[in-house]
Every structure is written in C-alpha cells, then in structure tokens.
Amino acid sequence: MKLDRVDVRILQALQQDAHIKAADLAESLGLSLSPFYRRVRLLEERGIISSHVTLLDQEKAGFPVSAYVSVAVDKKSAPLLKTFEQEIGNFEEVMECYLMTGAFDYMLRVVAPDIAGLERFVMEKLAKIDGVKDINTSIALRRVQYKTTLPVRIREE
C-alpha cells in the first residue's frame, strides 16, 4: 500500500498514543471524522495497523529479568522446526522468537520474575522441547533503549 503524508501522520500519532481522541487527531490533520475513520479502517484492512495494544512497564508488572536465549535444534528438518515453533508459542515468558541464520537456529526474548524463574523456564520448558540440542542464555543487565514505534515514511511503489 502506498502511504501518503496523511497516512504517515496518522500512523506516527497512533504509535505514540493510541488513546489520542480521533476528533483531535482528525482536526490536526485537517480531516473530518468520516474520512479519518475511513483511512484508519483501510490501514487496518491492509494489515499496516495489525492491532491496538496497551504497553506495560515490564518491571512494574513483575518481570524485571530480560534474557536473550539462542537455541540450536538438533536436526534442522522442517517438521522439527515446526514443532519447536508450535511449542515455543505456548510459553508466556517468550515475548519474541526469531528464526535465525548463523550458529543458532532461534533467538528468543524471554522475561521472568527473577533468575530462578528464568532457570525454571530454561530447564523445565525450553530444554524439554524435542530436538533442542544447545541453549545459550544472555541476561540483560539494563535496558538502554526500547522502541515500539516504527519509523514510517511515505513509500513510493
């Protein structure tokens, strides 16, 4: 979908504050509510806006430990990778999971209430998935930067 200046401004504003009043945002864009809502609906229908969420403070919500976990799967067969991906989707501690190139097959971002909770996740859940052969865990000491907003721009197609 080709984004114009108005689409970009809508996306930038909604990423910063999804609770912004539609009337206020529409007015700042020089739109009435009907065209504004049409644009937002079209952005949703085309999948550019995938969901509306509330972001929590990870530490205040009881999950101060962040870890990055690299996982190597024993046999890189499609069924084994699929099984791993299905299993990992069942674990609420896993915030993100990526299929990777390089020495490890997957990179996970995991949250935990404490180091013992992280250990339980690794030993009692992750290590028990069929085909997992190597796990390398790095604990984040401090978050330096965290963004949830994408740098949307006008795209020429």
Image (cartoon, grey):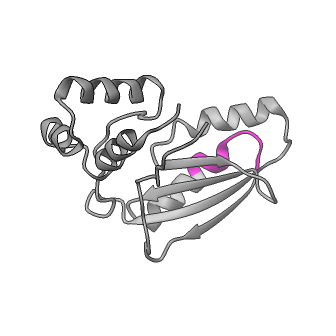
Q: Identify the residue shown where x is 46% and y is 34%.
A: 48
* Residue 108: x %, y % from top left: 59, 53
The residue lying toward the viewer, choosing from 125 and 106, is 106
Q: Identify the residue shown where x is 43% and y is 72%.
A: 143
Residue stretch rendered in magenta on the structure: 124-132
Q: Identify the residue shown where x is 54% and y is 43%.
A: 155
In the rendered structure, the answer to whether residue 73 lies left or right of residue 53 reads: right
Q: Identify the residue shown where x is 46% and y is 67%.
A: 115
Assign the C terminus to one quadrant of the image.
top right
The residue lying toward the viewer, choosing from 144 and 140, is 144
Residue 103 in the image: above or below residue 132: below
Q: How many marks?
A: 0
* Residue 40: x %, y % from top left: 32, 30
In the rendered structure, the answer to whether residue 36 lies left or right of residue 105 reads: left
Please check the rendered image and state whether residue 4 is part of the magenta-colored stretch, yes or no.
no
* Residue 41: x %, y % from top left: 34, 24
Residue 136 in the image: above or below residue 14: below
Please check the rendered image and state whether residue 125 is part of the magenta-colored stretch, yes or no.
yes
* Residue 152: x %, y % from top left: 46, 49
The residue lying toward the viewer, choosing from 146 and 58, is 146
The residue lying toward the viewer, choosing from 131 and 153, is 153
